Each structure stands twice: as structure tokens, then as C-alpha cells.
Image: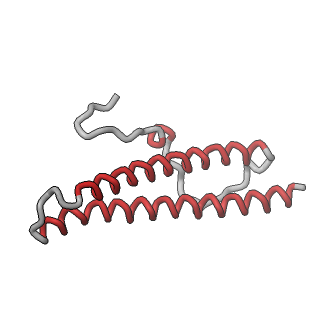
Amino acid sequence: MLKQRRMIADQIAASLFEAEAAIDVALAKTARLAGVMPGLRADAGLSALIGQDAVERASEAIAALASARRAIVETHKELDAAKTQIGLGAVMFGDGAEKPPQVALGRRLRTVGQTAA
């Protein structure tokens, strides 16, 4: 039974790490897109009005991906708790890097210019 739980945990961990990596890649690529559009527009000598809607949509996508990243991090924490609940508390998954303190994980994005609460 322990062997079966370990195999299941291995499969879940692999899927989790794959999902985390995919979200990070999507976030980075979308941020790069949002960052390159204004500069290329300016280089082309086009009005600031050109492509504004596209910049706004890309920015919305970044916010949505940041929310998805938060959700997958929370999923990771929940699965870590579940691992202990099924008797695999001593089993380590991941790359062996130390987890950051919980305080760092609890930070929220804030609008530029706001003071930290």
C-alpha cells in the first residue's frame, strides 16, 4: 500500500512541477510581449494610441497568469500537507532547494505607489 501511495505521489509531483513551470514560462513570455510592444511602436514612429488595447489585454493576461501562479503555489502547499496525511511526510519531492519562509510566500502584488500594509 505504501508503494502504491508513493507511486501516486510521484505522478502528482511530476504533474505539479510541470504545471508550475508552464505557468512561469507563460508569465515570462507574456511579460516580454507586453514589454516589447510599446518600444516597437515608438521605434516605428506610430502614435501612442496604436496598439493601446493590445497592451492593456496583455497586461490583463499577466495579471491572470500571476493569479494562476498564486493558485498553483497554494496547490503545492495543499499537496505537501496531503503528503503528510497519507504517511509520506518523510518523502522529499522537488529539486532539494530550500523552501522560502512562509512570509515571502504570503506577499501580494500591489499597485505601484501604494505603501506596504
Foreground of the two, 71 or 90: 71
Say which residue appears at 68% left-offset and 43% top-offset.
81
Above-or-below relation of 29 to 79: below
In the image, 30: left or right of 81?
left
Foreground of the two, 93 or 58: 58
**Colour mode of the rendering:** secondary structure
Q: Position of residue 84 (x, y in %)?
A: 74, 44
Quarter of the figure that contains the C terminus: top left
Say which residue appears at 67% left-offset and 48% top-offset.
79
Q: Position of residue 78 (x, y in %)?
A: 65, 43
In the figure, residue 115 lies in which quadrant? top left
Q: Position of residue 97 (x, y in %)?
A: 54, 58
Foreground of the two, 80 or 40: 40
In the figure, residue 107 lies in which quadrant? top left
Q: Position of residue 101 (x, y in %)?
A: 49, 42
In the image, 26: left or right of 111?
right
In the figure, residue 9 lies in which quadrant? bottom right
Say which residue appears at 51% left-offset and 39% top-offset.
102
Most extreme residue toward the top, as rendered?
A: 117
In the image, 2: left or right of 16?
right
Quarter of the figure that contains the N terminus: bottom right
